[in-house]
Each structure stands twice: as C-alpha cells, then as structure tokens.
Amino acid sequence: MGGTSMKAHRILVAVLAATIAASVFAQVSPQAPVPAVPDRLNRLTTIQGKIRKTEWTNPRVNLYIDVTDPDHVNVSWVVEITGSPNEWSAKGIKAIDLKVGRTVQATGTPTGGNRLEAPISGISFPQ
C-alpha cells in the first residue's frame, strides 16, 4: 500500500509542477506583443518660430517658441534642449544668442503636447 501512495504523491507533484510552469510561460511569452509607441513619438519634428522666453537651468535649457502654423495660428512650443549650458558654450552658443524675438529652428523628438526634446545639434538660427 505504501508504493501506491508514493506513486500518487509523485504524480501529484508532477502535475503541480507542470501547472505552475505552464502558468509562468503563459504570462511571460516570448511572442508577447510590445506596446505600440505612438507614431508622433517615433519621428523627428522641426519647428521654426520666434523665441518668447529662455530658461537656463543646469543641466537643461528650455526655449519657449511661438510658431505660426499653416493656418496662420500662433502655437506656443516648449523646446527642452538636452545638454548643459556648459556644453552650449562649448558649441559656441551663448545666452545672448537666445534673445527674445530671435528666429530659431529646432529639430527633435516630440514628448507630448507642444513639447519637443532637441539635442544641441538640433538648434539653428535661420537668417
């Protein structure tokens, strides 16, 4: 009789182990879909407008830019420029270059709303 209960015990342990393994693999499937990133966050966006305000806060510089859209409506954008003010200076850009009213072009990645994150190389001053 002892042999039958040991056999039943082994079968029960094997069934429990298989159930737990199946549950784990079902939750962490290698074919699980990756959440989609909105298309607007996958592409670079370029805006051009006049500087309304500049905030120099280490390690970021925020530009508030008024952009006129194709329908001639003014839209305010915030451009967060990656890189510290020291890196800006090393690239030859100084606080005086970012004066209110100056036209600036920024190319970067949208971060939601009218916000853009741009590297230092994404900033230029069209004539």
Image: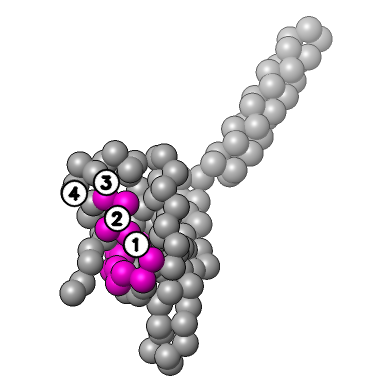
Kindly state the secondary structure of the residue where label 2 is placed. Answer: helix
Q: Nearer the viewer, mark 3 or mark 1?
A: 1
Q: Which residues are magenta?
A: 94-110
**Above or below: residue 109 compared with residue 88:** below
| Residue under the point 48% across and 78% down | 75
**Above or below: residue 71 compared with residue 31:** below
Residue 22 x, y percent position in the rendering: 60, 38
User: From mark 1 to mark 4, how far is it between C-alphas?
Assistant: 15 Å
Which residue position holds label 3? Answer: 88
Q: Which disc number belongs to residue 96?
A: 2
Q: Tag 3: residue type?
A: Trp
Q: Nearer the viewer, mark 1 or mark 4?
A: 1
* Viewer-closest of 124 and 97: 97
Mark 4 Cα within 10 Å, few/some/many (few <14, many 20+)?
A: few
Left or right side of 13 for 47 = left
Q: Quadrant of the C terminus?
A: bottom left
User: From mark 3 to mark 1, how far is it between C-alphas?
Assistant: 15 Å
Is 92 one of the magenta-colored residues? Answer: no
Mark 1 Cα within 10 Å, few/some/many (few <14, many 20+)?
A: some
Which residue position holds label 1? Answer: 99
User: From mark 2 to mark 3, how far is it between C-alphas?
Assistant: 12 Å
User: From mark 2 to mark 4, how far is it between C-alphas?
Assistant: 11 Å
Which residue position holds label 4? Answer: 92
Q: Tag 2: residue type?
A: Ile
Q: Quadrant of the N terminus?
A: top right
User: Taking the image as drawn, is residue 88 in sight?
Assistant: yes
Residue 116 x, y percent position in the rendering: 41, 62
